[in-house]
Structures are given as C-alpha cells and as structure tokens.
Image (spheres, rainbow, N blue to C red):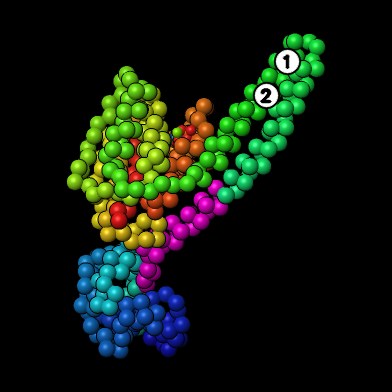
Amino acid sequence: MSDLPYLTLEYLATAIILLDEESRVTYLNPASEQLFDLNGKNLQGFPVQQVFSHSDQLSSAIQQAIHNDATYIEHDLTLGTFAHGKLHLRCAATPLQFNRRYLLLEFHPIDRPLKLAREEQMLDQTQANRMLLRNLAHEIKNPLGGIRGAAQLLEQELEKPALREYTQVIVQEADRLRALMENLLSPQNISHYSALNIHEVLERVRTVVLAEMPEGLTIQRDYDISLPALIGDKEQLIQVMLNIVRNAAQAMQGHGMITLRTRIARQVTLIKRRHRLAVKVQIIDTGPGVPAELHDKIFYPLVSGSADGHGLGLTLAQDYVNQHHGTIEFDSEPGQTCFTVMLPLP
Ligand SMILES: Nc1ncnc2c1ncn2[C@@H]1O[C@H](COP(=O)(O)OP(=O)(O)O)[C@@H](O)[C@H]1O
Ligand SMILES: [Mg+2]
C-alpha cells in the first residue's frame, strides 16, 4: 500500500479501522483511536474481535462483506469498548484489494445523541409553533369582536328581515372563530402540582367516556397497582387522558374495546433528562388506526381527521405532558392503535 491512502485516512473525521484478510488490525486512524479510546500501535496484529467485547454483530458484518465482496452496512451496531462501555454505531465494511486483501471498517456513532438531537429539535420547533399560534390567535381575537359588533349594528339598520340571515351568519361564524381562538390560547393555565395516583386519573376518564358513549364501548383496565405516586397536575393529566381516550372512542365510532394499561419503566430518557423511574400509560384501541397522511402531524395544532374536530386535543395533551417532563407517542395500524404517555416519577 502506498503512503497516500494512509495519509488521507489520518485526516478523516470518520473512524476507520483497516483489517487484514485474517481480520487482524492493521491500522486505526486517529478518529478511530479517539472514538474507542484505543492506541492503534499497540493493537497491530490483534484480531479485531479481541479489541472489542460484544463483537458478534461486527463479525457478522465482516463476514457479509467478504462473502458478497461488496460494502456491507450495519445500521445499528452495538460494540463493547473498554473505555466507554457499549457504543451504538453505524458501520460500513468494505473489502479492498491492493497488493493484498484488506477490509475497511468505517464507524459513525448513532442512537442516543442522534435521538436526543432530534427530540431537542422537535421540542424547539413545537414550542416555536405554539408561540406563533398563540400570538396569532391573540391578534385574530381582537378584530373579531369588532366584526361581530359591526354586524349587529348593521342588522339593526336592515329593513328587509331576509337580509338579517346574512348578518346572523357573520355573528355566528365570528363566535365560532372566537371559541377556537380561546381554545388555542388556553394552555397557558397555571399548573397545580401535587402527589397523585395515575389510576384515579384513569378511572375518572373511564367514567366520563363511558357516560358519553354508553353503548358498544368497553374500557378494560390493565393496571399495575404497585405504581408509586406521581407528582403532577391532576386536572391537566385528566385532560390529557381524556383527549386520548375520546379520540380512540371516536375513531371506533363508540363501538369496540379500549384498554388502559399502566406499567413502571426504568432508566428512561425523556426530553433530554434521564430518569430512574417513570410511569408508562398506554391507551390501546381496536379502531381503524390513525390515517396514514396524518401520521407525522397529529400533534400539530389544527390537524384533524374529522370534519367537526378542531385538531387541538392532542396538541394540548402534548403541551401538558411536556410540562410534566414527559413524552407522548403513538403507534398505529388498522385494528390496533396505541398511545403511550411516559411520565417521570420523582
Ligand atoms: N386512536 C385514534 N385512532 C385513529 N385516529 C386517531 C386516534 N387518535 C387521534 N386520531 C387522529 O388524530 C386527529 C387529531 O386528534 P386531535 O388532536 O384530538 O383533534 P380532533 O379530535 O379535534 O380531530 C383526529 O382527528 C384523528 O384523525
Ligand atoms: Mg380529539
């Protein structure tokens, strides 16, 4: 091998390990030494499987690359290192032929940092959107009052009663818009935090929704009654669960089964914070599922799959859950939709 390829590898930001045909380490570039906290010189000639623990996935990626004589990419590789414990990486293994055969391994760290960055970005964006919307709602509300008042004055001046129908429309629509704007502005409520039992919250929601849809709806409980108390705003959490359960009931048109499940979750990262314990609440329905075209955006305000929906239920639910440092996610296919709310425990 001439010196030039080595020289370029030295400057790469990507972590590179070069193996010989027996999978022994020939070379580690500085990025790789840094990523794994290894010294390349000491490792020359070592079988790569001995450099790392949990190297099964790596071995199989190497075998695949050699077998196919082509680049093999493992998108989610776990590798045990002495310095940093387990690392999650994307790894590309490429067979090379110079004067002899080599195998080039490229590593890109993934998972946690990436997931966190995505979450962080989403949270920022959501907050920016909400702010924009709130300001907009505020700006719309004021002139609406003027429009409504003017329509009423106009109505008094109208001689033909038939024409009043039109002013009535203006008044009614102004009222409808006003109610919507009020809804958009509401999540600014002040929270009242106290110790609470999540099952009390769920029981209340269950009673309300069953009363709303008395026929054909079953709400089954699957509670872990050993769950410790949560610190939160009870009214807000009732609203959260109510919005999700109502959506499920509406999606099934009041006929079908909803399951309320609670479990404990350990060692979870929720919006950038690591928690030892969290409560996991799942609301599962047997309905047709969230329409595919809404999958990326149901938490956005004003996104609704129904003609008479406002598209604010899940937005509000997410706002409240985030205020509790928790997350809300869903997984949906026809016949099974599951909304998962994670709430950290103290
Ligand atoms: N369990 C569910 N099954 C199917 N679709 C759902 C479910 N939950 C939410 N959706 C979809 O997400 C949309 C947004 O819900 P939401 O924010 O509560 O607004 P709204 O209920 O006013 O439409 C709903 O209109 C519906 O299309
Ligand atoms: Mg709703």
Q: Disc 1 on helix, strand or loop?
A: helix
Q: Residue at x 20, y 42 (%)?
A: 225
Q: Is residue 311 left or right of residue 138?
A: left
**210, above or below 18, in the image:** above
Q: Is residue 122 left or right of residue 50?
A: right
**86, above or below 306, in the image:** below
State the image coordinates of residue 212 (x, y, percent, origin top left).
Answer: 37, 23
Label 1 lies in ligand 1 vicinity (Cβ under 8 Å) = no
The disc at residue 50 is none
Label 2 lies in ligand 1 vicinity (Cβ under 8 Å) = no
Comparing 245 with 291, the one in front is 245
**Residue occupied by mark 1:** 164
Callout 2 environment at 10 Å: few (<14), some (14 to 19), or many (20+)? Answer: some
Residue extent of the magenta highlight: 106-130
The disc at residue 171 is 2
Comparing 297 with 267, the one in front is 267
Residue 29 picture quarter:
bottom left
Cα–Cα gap, marks 1 and 2: 10 Å
In contact (CB < 8 Å): disc 1 and disc 2: no
Residue 117 belongs to the span the image colors magenta: yes
Quadrant in which the N terminus appears: bottom left
Residue 257 belongs to the span the image colors magenta: no
Residue type (three-letter) at the residue carrying disc 2: Val
Main secondary structure type of the part rendered in magenta: helix
Residue type (three-letter) at the residue carrying disc 1: Arg
State the image coordinates of residue 151 (x, y, percent, origin top left).
Answer: 74, 24
